[in-house]
Amino acid sequence: LGLGAFQAQAAIVTVRLSNNVFTPNDLTINVGDTVRFINDAGFHDVRADDGSYGNTPAVAGWQFDHTYNSAGEFRVYCTVHSSPGANINTSMNARITVIAAPTFAISQGLNGTWVNPSNLGQGFLFDFSTANSFMFGAWFTYDTAASAQQKLGVATSRWLTMQGNYQGDTVTLDVFETSGGVFNQPTTTTTTQIGTATLRFTSCTEGSLSFALTQPPISGTIPLQKALPAFGSGCAAATVPE
């Protein structure tokens, strides 16, 4: 990407409904982005707290899209299981923060290692291809609970992979887990999608990853910083003056 004018393209961010919760239930998007609500299980609907949009309660299988064309904080809830203004952490409610369109665009200068400075024992490796706006990522983390020690490494170590296409400052990702492998052996492996994620950058050195996993059902947002500066790929060229 050069220093020319940059126009952000709208993204579609998925929020899933099941077990009387929205996942994720607290997200940040850009003006013009669409949130796609998908009911995976149960009898639910989605309704804006102010009543300006929503659908009719129904069993699993429905999809409802809403595009946010102005900045601000917007809240939604399920009319069957909650009420407007309820706590998003204890009720079937969600908060959507809409910010102005970005002036930062992804480039290969973001390739490399990214970490949460408050949790340096794990991290991410990102690789961007500007030829087709594609990103591949590796997520080095741990299981949610301890397990028995194995012969090589730590039994709780987990390596997840992510891939997807990016627009502007945002990547929409599918998250995968690969199992069945043996150290340095050509054994058959199985790769299964276990969730989705949204990766957003605010500068050459800062970003965040919002994730929603289904196996196990867990979601959250991780602040990220680049571990090492980019060399030779010109991340500064992706920052577009306002």
Image: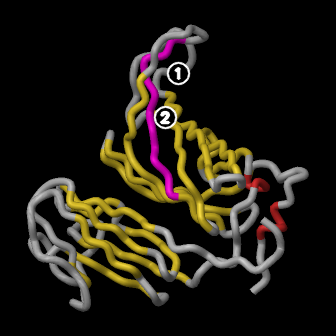
> Horizontally, is 47 left or right of 119 in the view?
left
**In the rendering, at what x and y percent does residue 184 appear?**
61, 10
**In the rendering, at what x and y percent does residue 134 appear?**
62, 51
Q: Residue at x 66, y 69 (%)?
A: 202
Based on the picture, tell me whether residue 91 belongs to the magenta stretch. no
> Horizontally, is 166 left or right of 82 in the view?
right
Q: What residue would you read off at disc 1?
A: 154
Q: Residues within 10 Å of mark 1 (few under 14, many from 20)?
A: few
- Amino acid type shown at disc 2: Tyr
Q: Secondary structure at mark 1?
A: loop
- Figure quadrant of the C terminus: bottom right
Q: Which residues are magenta?
A: 172-182
Q: Residue at x 74, y 49 (%)?
A: 111
Q: Residue at x 83, y 67 (%)?
A: 237
> Horizontally, is 199 left or right of 216 in the view?
right
Please tell me which residue lies in front, 167 or 96: 167
Q: Tell me the tag on residue 169.
A: none
- The residue most toward the front is 131
Q: What residue would you read off at disc 2?
A: 142
Q: Is residue 230 above or below residue 148?
A: below
User: Mark 2 or mark 1, which is nearer the start of the sequence?
Assistant: 2
**In the rendering, at what x and y percent does residue 223 appear?**
58, 59
Residues at badges 1 and 2 in contact (C-beta under 8 Å)? Answer: yes
- The count of marks equals 2
